[in-house]
Structure formats: C-alpha cells, structure tokens
Image: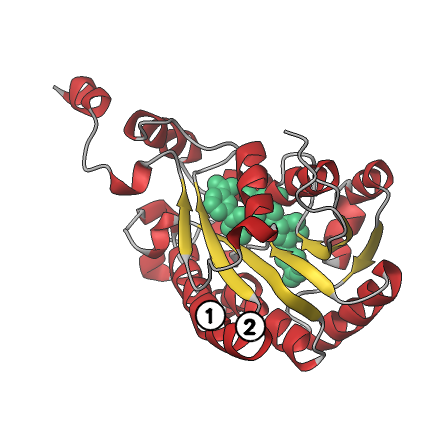
C-alpha cells in the first residue's frame, strides 16, 4: 500500500527495538505513506537493538528517552519539533515491559517493586508522554496519539501476568487524557488492541506459541501481523479518522468477538 495519506505529517515513534517490533513496521509504513518522524527508545534499547539502521533507512533521527522520565520526554519533544520544523501530527507509544514476566514470577507471587516498575514503563509513561505534549502544546489540531494494547486488559490470560493490569490502566489513561486532549486541543487518543505477535516483548510471555495458535484458530480472519498493525496505525494517524477518539480498537482478525470457533471445537472433541 503506498497511498500518501500522511504526506506532510510529522511525529514521534517510540519503541522500535529491532525489525520485529511493531514500531519498526509502523515507521516503515509511515515513510511509505509520506510522513516524517523522530524515532525514540530507552538508551539501553538503542545500545542493544538495531534502531540506527532503521533511522538510516527511513532518513530519520534517533533521540534517546526513557519514557518513565519526564525530563527525557520534555527534551525529546522540544528537539523533535526543532528537527521536524513545527508541531507534531502523530505519536506512537509502542512501549511495554514487565520485570515479573521477564523473571518468570507467577501472578500470585508478584514482586510489587517490579510490578510498580512495569506499570510505570507500560502504562504511566503514556500519561507522562501526553502530559508533556499537552503542556508544551506540541500537537497540531486533529493530530493523533496511539498506544498499543492487548485483550488481556478485558479478559484473563493467565500467562500475561501483570501486563494485563498494565494494559487495563493504559487503556483507561487513553480515555481519560483523550477527553482533555479532544476538548482543549482537538487531538485524538486511542489504543489498538493487537493480536499476539512474535516480537521481543511478545516472546517474553510464557507459552506465546500456544497463544498464537489458539488466537489463529479463533479469529475468522486469522491473527493480525505486525505489518498489518502498522497499516492500521497509519489509518489512525491520517485525516480519514478525525472523529475517532477515546477508543480501544481491536485489531485482531475478529478474535475479541468470537465465543468459540469450529476449529477449536474440532481440536478438542
Ligand atoms: N507482541 C505482542 O504479542 C503484542 C500484542 C499486543 C500488544 N503489544 C504491545 O505492543 C507494544 C510494542 O511491543 P512489541 O511487541 O513491538 O515488542 P518490542 O519488544 O519490539 O517493543 C517494546 C519496546 O518498549 C521499549 N521500552 C521498554 N522500556 C522502555 C522505556 N523505559 N522507555 C522507552 N521505551 C521502552 C523497548 O525498548 C522496546 O523497543 C507494547 O506496548 C506491547 O505490549 C504487543
């Protein structure tokens, strides 16, 4: 797809770690759609990942920012506007991390310091980001802010652990901040609830392979890939979706509205 639906639009893309990342695919789709951006990630992720090759390929600059640090976000937003030559039209928050998931802590045994850290990175960072954008009046009218979520925010997926709670909080922040961003600045705020996807964050979830196969069998259209998520995201950055806001939008091949599929029945009967 190469419609230039983002021609002239400028933004910030958080969370491209490597070429499996949803943010990486989104950066490629934004370029194809005619948009320009600054890439950002945590300093350690820039050192460990391959974001600089994406920057080269897309002709964009990389600015390090820990999304839990408001000072980092303030500097990033100022510098991004300088580099891009004005206010922003789109921002992608594609950030998630749970120390408990990483260390294999069972939900009933959660370490609460780690829980607080994961909550800060995966959910509160979205509030911090929007607060900085809002106070700096850094978004153009009819701009669009998107964060990525997962259906464990609504339904129980035991292995998703405390990330389920983080996603519920993230989606609530999108609605709460989205109200004020809409009212005061005419800016949209939405979350996309994406199918399970093979990325570094995804692979951290125990039994992801099972999740993927189950979701594939349950979804009438099959799982949505990272590339498809990127295409959906650019539609939300475009002028074609100017009145869509405060929504959690399922991008999951229909998974979220299926009770059971024939394939699942066949596989257990
Ligand atoms: N992979 C899946 O199955 C799936 C499904 C639904 C939603 N999501 C969500 O999509 C988003 C992107 O994840 P992904 O699957 O592309 O994996 P990914 O591992 O490629 O991306 C996660 C990103 O978060 C960044 N990050 C972590 N801590 C940070 C911090 N303090 N400051 C700034 N950045 C930080 C990482 O460096 C990484 O780039 C996440 O919010 C994830 O929860 C993923």
Verify CB contact (< 8 Å) between mark 2 and mark 1.
yes
Give the residue pinned by disc 1: 173
Nearer to us in this view, 147 or 203 = 147
Residue occupying image coordinates x 28% and y 30%: 218
In the picture shown, does residue 147 fall above or below 222?
below
Nearer to us in this view, 196 or 228 = 228
Based on the displayed image, in which of its 4 quarters is residue 215 positioned?
A: top left
**Mark 2 lies within 8 Å of ligand 1 (Cβ measured):** no
Residue occupying image coordinates x 86% and y 63%: 85
**Any part of residue 103 in sight:** no
Q: In the displayed structure, does residue 167 sit left or right of residue 260?
A: right
In the picture shown, does residue 29 fall above or below 79?
above
Nearer to us in this view, 253 or 153 = 253
Residue occupying image coordinates x 75% and y 75%: 74
10 Å crowding of disc 1: few (<14), some (14-19), many (20+): many
Decide which of tag 2 and tag 1 comes sooner along the chain.
Answer: 2
- Give the residue furthest to the left: 269
Q: In the displayed structure, does residue 27 sit left or right of residue 61?
A: left
Quadrant showing the C terminus? top left
Question: Residue 236: x, y in percent?
Answer: 55, 50
Asked which secondary structure carries label 1, the reply is helix
In the picture shown, does residue 255 fall above or below 155?
above
Q: In the displayed structure, does residue 145 sit left or right of residue 197?
A: right
Give the residue pinned by disc 2: 127
Asked which secondary structure carries label 2, the reply is helix
Question: Residue 16: x, y in percent?
Answer: 69, 46
Question: Residue 97: x, y in percent?
Answer: 55, 55
């Amino acid at each position: 797809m190469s419609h230039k639906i983002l021609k002239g639009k400028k933004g910030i893309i958080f969370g491209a770690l490597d070429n499996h990342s949803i943010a990486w695919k989104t950066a490629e789709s934004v370029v194809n759609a005619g948009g320009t951006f600054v890439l950002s990630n945590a300093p350690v992720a820039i050192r460990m990942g391959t974001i600089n090759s994406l920057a080269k390929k897309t002709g964009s600059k990389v600015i390090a920012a820990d999304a839990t640090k408001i000072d980092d976000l303030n500097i990033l937003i100022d510098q991004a506007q300088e580099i891009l030559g004005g206010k922003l039209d789109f921002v992608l928050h594609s950030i998630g991390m749970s120390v408990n998931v990483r260390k294999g802590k069972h939900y009933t045994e959660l370490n609460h310091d780690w829980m607080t850290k994961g909550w800060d990175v995966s959910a509160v960072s979205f509030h911090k980001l929007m607060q900085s954008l809002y106070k700096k009046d850094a978004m153009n009218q009819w701009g669009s802010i998107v964060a990525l979520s997962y259906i464990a925010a609504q339904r129980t997926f035991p292995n998703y652990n405390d990330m389920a709670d983080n996603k519920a909080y993230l989606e609530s922040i999108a609605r709460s901040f989205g109200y004020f961003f809409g009212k005061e600045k005419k800016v949209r705020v939405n979350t996309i609830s994406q199918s399970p996807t093979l990325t570094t964050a995804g692979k951290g979830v125990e039994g992801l392979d099972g999740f993927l196969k189950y979701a594939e069998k349950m979804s009438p259209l099959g799982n949505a890939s990272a590339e498809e998520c990127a295409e959906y995201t650019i539609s939300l950055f475009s002028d074609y979706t100017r009145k869509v806001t405060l929504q959690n939008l399922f991008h999951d091949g229909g998974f979220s509205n299926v009770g059971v599929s024939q394939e699942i029945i066949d596989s257990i009967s």
